Amino acid sequence: MSDSSKGLASPIMTAIITCPVCDRDNVIFYSLKAKSLASKQNVFSIPIYLDTPKYVYVDYNDYTFSVCPDCYFTSANKKEFIYMDSIIGVKNKTTLLPKVLQHWKENPKEIEDILADNFVDETSFKEPRTDEGIISSYKLAIYKTSLEIKYKIPYSNLRRGKIYLKLFYTSRKLYKKDNEDILKLALEDFEYVFKESDFPEISYEYELLYLIAAIYMRLGDEAKATSYMKVFDQTKANILQKAKADQRINTSEVVKWLTRAKDLWQERSDNNVWEVMKPWPLR
Ligand SMILES: [Zn+2]
């Protein structure tokens, strides 16, 4: 029996929006209905969506980025597109940085070149999104985030590193193969973010340290993984020390991520841990 004949609802919501770059006005924006799909994280903090009795199974990672099929403008943030606000009844202004908008307008050739190896048309980015549409949406999202880095929007390296991790997962899913080069690109971004402390608040540093250590373990560089774990241990010790004097300091996040890093270190020789299509821990 197909999902629809079982009467299951789709967990995905759509909105019709206007592209801020080329003004095309029937672009579809995708978002996930609140409390529809449960998920667990894989070893690289990517959500693995789980089957639920009420909804059709969808891997929402495939729809993270909405794409204009004319100029290929791509975003995960609805506010960067233009749409009628149903409460106040007027159109919003895009929150996209004017320099990024301008760049996108003026460089159509550069953007088409990104998709030179991909066959995409009008329907590729819709639901159900084609494999080529999914991969293209990631390539475009990485290009856009690279522009945001170029135009100095804070935390863009952190966002791009996370998109690389999602692309690593998605490539594994579509091509049945781990592409370590993508992991190395994520690692480059994360090490830069760590060095520059380019994250919105301190709690991001713990997940970042975890991810850097995890990628080094996956790449088999145990010396590097160990050196970041040492930094992590020291960070935790400093925070616990400060928390003694100031009870407002939250210690649960640092403990959670360091514990996760140490558990991973213990299990690193089990290949199942690195199977990115599955949640981790496995239990
Ligand atoms: Zn457009």
Image (cartoon, rainbow, N blue to C red):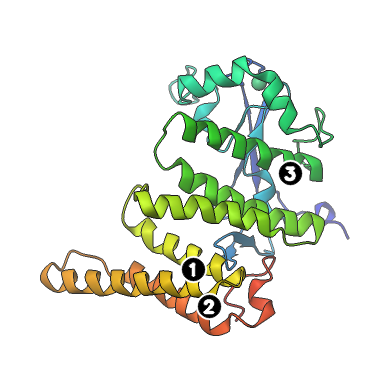
The tag on residue 264 is 2
Residue type at tag 1: Ala
Residue type at tag 2: Leu
Q: How crowded is mark 2: few (under 14 residues within 10 Å), some or many (20 or more)?
A: many
Dot 3 lies on which element? helix
- Decide: is 96 above or below 272: above
Q: Do the CB atoms of the residues marked 3 and 2 lie less than 8 Å apart? A: no
Q: What's the distance in space between the residues labelled 3 and 2, CA to CA? A: 29 Å
- Decide: is 197 above or below 130: below
Residue beneath the point at 53% across and 75% down: 222
- Decide: is 243 above or below 13: below
Q: Earlier in the sequence, mark 3 or mark 1?
A: 3
Dot 1 lies on which element? helix
Determine the image quadrant of residue 251.
Answer: bottom left
Q: Does the residue labelled 2 lie within 8 Å of ligand 1?
A: no
Q: What's the distance in space between the residues labelled 3 and 1, CA to CA? A: 27 Å
Q: Nearer the viewer, residue 230 or 95?
A: 230
Q: Do the CB atoms of the residues marked 1 and 2 lie less than 8 Å apart? A: yes
